[in-house]
Each structure stands twice: as C-alpha cells, then as structure tokens.
Amino acid sequence: MWDMGTPISFATAERQDGNGSTEGDMSEYNDYPVRELVESAEEVISENLRKGVACHVFFKATCPWCGARPMFQEPNTVYPRMECSECGKEFDFVKGNYMVVMSNDGELLREMLEREERIDRERERERDRERNRKGNGGG
C-alpha cells in the first residue's frame, strides 16, 4: 500500500448537499456502473500523472439498506461486495462513485509513474500478441 504523503487537494466525482450529508434522497448521488467507474478512475489517475501529480481513488457506493456512503479503505481497489460502515450490512458493489485524493509525495509519484509505465508496456505486449495471432491466421 502506498503512503499518500501530505494531501494537497481533494476532489470528488459525485454531487453532495451543502453539508456533506449522506441522509435523505439517495437519488441525490450520481452513481455509475462499476466498469465505467474503473475506466474513469484510470483516466483520472493517468491524466494527473501526466501533470506530475500523484493521486489515489477511493471507490464508494450508496448502501441500499440505510442510504449511507461507505467507501473501500484501500485506494485504487474495487471488490464485488461492500460492507456498510453505518448499518453493517453487506451488499453487491454494482454501482457507485469515487473520491480522488491528490498528493505531492515524490515517492508516491515515482511509484505511480512506474506502475503506469508497466501497465502501458503490458498493454503494448497484449496488442502485439493479438496482432501476431491475427497475422498467423489465429483469429
């Protein structure tokens, strides 16, 4: 797990009421399917890395039982089920949103840039394998 260092700013991809309350009408939240969330979070992380800013995303959802907004405690991590921090009930994590935490921690930035480069290299290898399969009549 990365040390987030000193947070320099916070941003959220959801709309909240003025006092940050999680009570009331659950339609107040802009929850999206998990696949869209992950893709969006990857774009946010990559975009910030290109700007030289390290960040983490913390995924959250609306509890169908009590309306609270529990969040996964591990950054950049999604699990199929979530436990509500308010009522304690578990539910399937099928839609939600995320919070972005940005940091000026140089070590974190270096680690994230290296991770991004590894992901890019793996994607390029996968594209090469796919091209080779197609070129060899395999697909």
Image: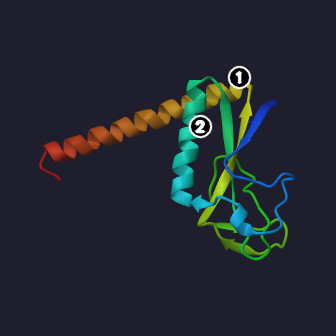
Label whose residue precedes the other's in the sequence (1 or 2): 2
> Does residue 4 appear in this view?
no
Rendered residue at 63%/25% (across/down)? 110
- From the image, tell me which residue sits under label 1: 106
Query: What's the amino acid at mark 1?
Result: Gly
Q: Is residue 22 above or below residue 8?
A: below
Rendered residue at 69%/29% (across/down)? 108
Query: What's the amino acid at mark 2?
Result: Ile
> Does residue 100 appear in this view?
yes
Q: Residue furthest left?
A: 137
Residue 85 spot, x, y in % from top left: 82, 65
Of 121 and 30, the residue lying toward us:
30
Q: Nearer the viewer, mark 1 or mark 2?
A: 2
The quadrant in which residue 5 appears is top right
- From the image, tell me which residue sits under label 2: 45
Q: Secondary structure at mark 1?
A: helix
